[in-house]
Amino acid sequence: MENILEIRNLSVSFASDGVRERAVAVNGVDIDIPRGKTVGLVGESGCGKSVTSLSVMGLLAANGRVEGGSAMFGGQDLLKLNDRQMRQIRGNRISMIFQEPMTSLNPVIPVGKQVAEALRLHTGADAKAAKVRTVEIFGKVGIPEPEKRYGCYPHQLSGGLRQRVMIGMAMILKPDLLIADEPTTALDVSIEAQILRLMRDLQRESGTSILMITHNLGVVAELCDSVYVMYAGEVVETAEVHALFDACAHPYTRGLMASLPRMTPKGQRLYNIPGTVPNLRAMPAGCRFAPRCAFAVERCQNEKPPLITVGDGHCCRCFTPLSRGAAPGGEPL
Amino acid sequence: MSALLRAEHLVKEFPAKGGVVHAVSDVSFAIEAGETLGLVGESGCGKSTLGKLLLDLIPPTSGKVWFKDQDLSLLRGEPLRALRRGMQMIFQDPYASLDPRMSVGRIIMEPLNAHRVGASRRERADMVRALMERVGLRPEFYNRYPHQFSGGQRQRIGIARALALNPELIICDEPVSALDVSIQAQILNLLSDLQAQSHLTYLFISHDLNVVRYLSDRVIVMFLGQICELSGTEALYAAPRHPYTRFLLDAVPQPDPNRRDEARAMLTGEVSSPVNPPAGCRFHPRCPYADDRCRREPPQLTELEPGRLCACHHPL
């Protein structure tokens, strides 16, 4: 299958005040996003999932630096483009939506005008046609009273409505790739369900590929075709979505799944992964998950496991990948 | 079972631009000693306001709270202080609810000082160390500051502070919402352990239906300031009676890709505003079963079967 985006060996580091050594937040990450598919990127806070997408978009904070790797998109390496070239691609061919849409909307311009403006730049439509089309799109993404909302400023809309505006914008621009970073995390469940459905509609109509960055395994199961699981700056497992939920192979993935309250009846203890994520400046020498892993042996402490193939399109960074149905292992804390 | 706490026709209204916020409108229920009562609902449904009313942190517009058969509104001074020791709160944001300039030891000791527990400072310090151990914090961290801890550890600090006065009731307001899944599991296990050890009663406020299901014996579902359903947990999740509960349950993305194509009911529209809420049943503008009666007449919370209360003219 043709990939719309191929990230290879991406490494990103950050400087911080008073520390000479740079912290490596993303270390040798490979990700493929097939055309027209939705790829999930999951992991807990600080695992590098957002940094990965921000570096691809050229939106790293000033103290961040891409140390190496490539991100091939339509024959160009996004990591080698200058700001001007990148601006051509952002919005037009790759759109992003964030957890808080307020950060991507201009607070002093009515939302309708912002979308119409993008439409005019993109299609060359005249002002009147752009407005008509914008109102139409607002209706389509479920914004009540779209004519009235056209003139509203972002702060006058709820979080759910703002996210709809962003998705409406993406629907107009029909990007090849939509990067969605926790787009529903701040929303109530009933609104979340609507936004996820809208994203699916967008994909069906425009053939847009989606990179869905989330900590929520429910959202992954709902929307994604394939999944990458990140831990401490590295991809530890990747699989087709059913394979991941049926038979994940990495102890970290298994631990995450077992921690979900959904899977455990009341009265039984929840499985939890002992300990915490390692410090970026003090990574374990061997497997980065070894200090928290119930299956770790001596080799795991000293030697870095490679990403090995354990099934069709299923890879896992572990010397002893779990077989289907294995218990998460270890003692609950 | 006896009720540890009872809410009686609680109402809380706030003045607002363009009207009145009906945050809590005529809410009555009881929390039984030793149980975990879950309280779910979406943003603005009044669940946090209700939690604060129960603890007498804000005064109700009308209605009463009874804790251990005493009417909080009639108590003043020392008797009120004494009664309040029995009820504590854990907050959502462990970053915002801890004073960054106070050491962990002082944070946990504060309630002990306020209620003059223990004969000396040294005795209180020993109690703080014991509390830290109880919640899984190393007592050596006594002199550290909140920023030196992770989110999960900070929530443990908040729990230790809540436990300091040996309360009977703890109101947990979204205690794990800001935490990663693996850390969330650690805190939920800790809350279960503490309940088993100390016969604690919890009111567990959350928007996360999976977490509430795991922890609660009974669940209250709130919508725009009112209870729409109250039921035993398993019964509620297996067969909700209020249409709003049904929609909420259907909306939760489940970690099972085989279920994504299931036909699911989906709520349309935005969450209505608690400023000037709709007449009749407050849910009617979003309810596919609504008829004229729903638009006119607010449904009463009625017992459909033992232990199952629902406020709907057309229960499922």
Image: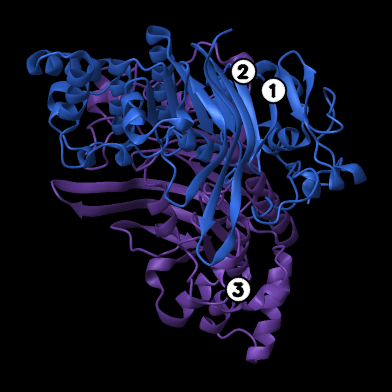
Chain colours: A blue, B purple
What is the x, y in percent for residue B149?
60, 63
Binning the other alpha carbons within 10 Å of mark 1 as few (below 14), some (14 to 19) or many (20 upward) gives many
Tell me which chain the residue with mark 2 is part of.
Answer: B
Residue drawn at (45%, 16%), measured in percent from left and top?
A74
Residue position for label 3: B165
Left or right position of A190 against A26: left
Say whether mark 2 and mark 1 are on the same chain: no
What is the x, y in percent for residue B29?
47, 47
A260 lies above or below B49: above
Asked which secondary structure carries label 2, the reply is helix
What is the x, y in percent for residue A208?
42, 14
Residue position for label 2: B257
A179 lies above or below B200: above
What is the x, y in percent for residue A191?
39, 29
Q: Amino acid at mark 1?
A: Phe
- Calculate the distance from the C-alpha at mark 3 to the C-alpha at mark 2: 46 Å
Query: Which of the 4 quarters of the picture holds residue A29?
Result: top right
Q: Quick one: B7 or A251, which is closer to the camera?
A: A251
Residue position for label 1: A245
Q: Amino acid at mark 2?
A: Pro
Q: Is residue B283 visible?
A: no
Choose the circle earlier in sequence order: 3 or 2.
3
Query: Which of the 4 quarters of the picture holds residue A306?
Result: top right
